[in-house]
Amino acid sequence: MTQVRIGIIGGSGLYRMEALKDVEEVRVETAFGDPSDALIVGNLDGVPVAFLARHGRHHQLLPTEVPYRANILAMKQLGVEYILSASAVGSLQAEIAPLDLVIPDQFIDRTFARPSTFFGNGLVGHVTFGDPFCPALSQLLAEAVSLAEIPEIKLHQGGTYVCMEGPAFSTKAESQLYRSWGAQIIGMTNLTEAKLAREAEIAYATLALVTDYDCWHPDHDSVTVEMVIANLHKNATNAQKVVRSAVGLLSDRWPESAAHEALRYALMTPPEHVPAETRQRLALLLQKYWG
Ligand SMILES: CSC[C@H]1O[C@H](OP(=O)(O)O)[C@H](O)[C@@H]1O
Ligand SMILES: Nc1ncnc2[nH]cnc12
């Protein structure tokens, strides 16, 4: 199978990368089912990458329905070591305005109806997740924003992303609660993806595109899909420029990441006590340590 080291996951409003050349649609089957869509393998300025539309190319999958495990495992099967994610988010703070960019560094997990681990079925593992985004990859993404020279776009480096279950947006009481917790942005997808990427030893960073003020701001209307889409259309081109320059930087540096060794001290169950079927299903993640 084609091998690529860089994966790109596009969220709401980013269903394809226009600058991708020599594209091939790869239907990847995984032990956790089919990914959201075919992976689009091609090259960005000569660098091989694999692109995946998180909700499917026609946006058919709810945040709860996205097959996150299959998506991450499909990336791993292609050889991906770094994932750049692009996501639409609401702002929970006045100084983070619609159309701004945020590179988050923390999460608060409010999801409750989706699998978020590869472990279980006789294999217990606990990965370190204190820094849920890869700091080196996030720093590189910030440099890519400067390199992309996007006029009048403000970048916020760092920030806490509240990951809610959805699909309905938050109530005002919830939105105020998250503000009181000091969180900066809100979305419905990234926590699950980042956790699974960590378990798969893939470095993960997010470029968050702010589309709205959720529903807490007294001077702005509550978020609607129409609002999100209108703002995404305005900055989807910017997102692609940033991702493109990030891929260029990444292919020069291939930074070290603690994520690449995340399973070294995470596996609790001795291999001889793990059911053969579970070992088989997770072979790609375990083979480095268990042969
Ligand atoms: C269309 S608004 C809500 C939707 O947008 C975000 O998606 P993604 O993270 O894939 O860009 C948010 O998480 C919700 O899924
Ligand atoms: N306000 C919001 N809440 C949750 N997810 C979002 N995605 C974009 N805006 C959002």
Image (cartoon, rainbow, N blue to C red):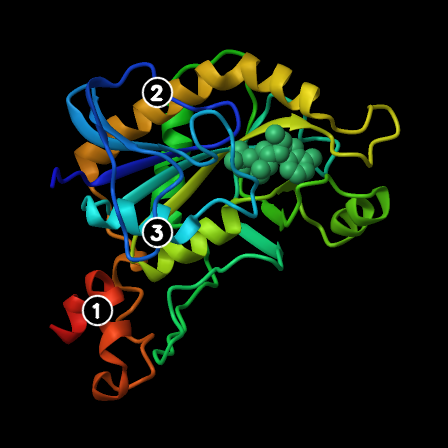
Q: Residues within 10 Å of mark 2 (few under 14, many from 20)?
A: many
* Image height of 281 relative to 211, above or below: below
Label 2: element kind = loop
Q: Is residue 227 left or right of residue 276?
A: right
Q: Which residue is mark 2?
A: 17
Return the disc, 3 or 2, that comes first in the chain's sequence: 2
In the picture, residue 251 is in which quadrant?
top left
Please give left or right for residue 85 compared with residue 153 in the image. Answer: left
**Which residue is depicted at the point 46% across and 58% down?**
131
The front one of 253 and 243 is 243
Q: Is residue 75 above or below residue 52?
A: below
Query: Crowdedness of circle 3 by 10 Å Cα count: few (<14), some, many (20+)?
Result: some
Disc with the residue nearer the chain's start (1 vs 2): 2
User: Front-most of 62 and 287?
Assistant: 62
Q: Position of residue 170 (x, y in %)?
A: 76, 43
Report x, y in % for residue 47.
17, 27
Q: Is residue 152 left or right of residue 259?
A: right
Residue at horizontal 37%, vertical 30%? 143
In x, y percent, where is residue 116? 48, 60
Q: Secondary structure at mark 1?
A: helix
Q: Residue at x 57, y 53 (%)?
A: 107
Residue that extends furthest to the right in the rendered view of this protein: 218
For the N terminus, which image quadrant?
top left
The residue to which callout 1 is attached is: 280
Residue 112: x and y in percent read 62, 60
Q: Name which of mark 1 and mark 3 comes first in the sequence.
A: 3
**Rendering quarter of residue 145:** top left
The number of discs equals 3
What amino acid is found at the position of numbered circle 2 in the picture? Met
What label sits on residue 33 in the rendered view?
A: 3
Dot in front, 3 or 2: 3
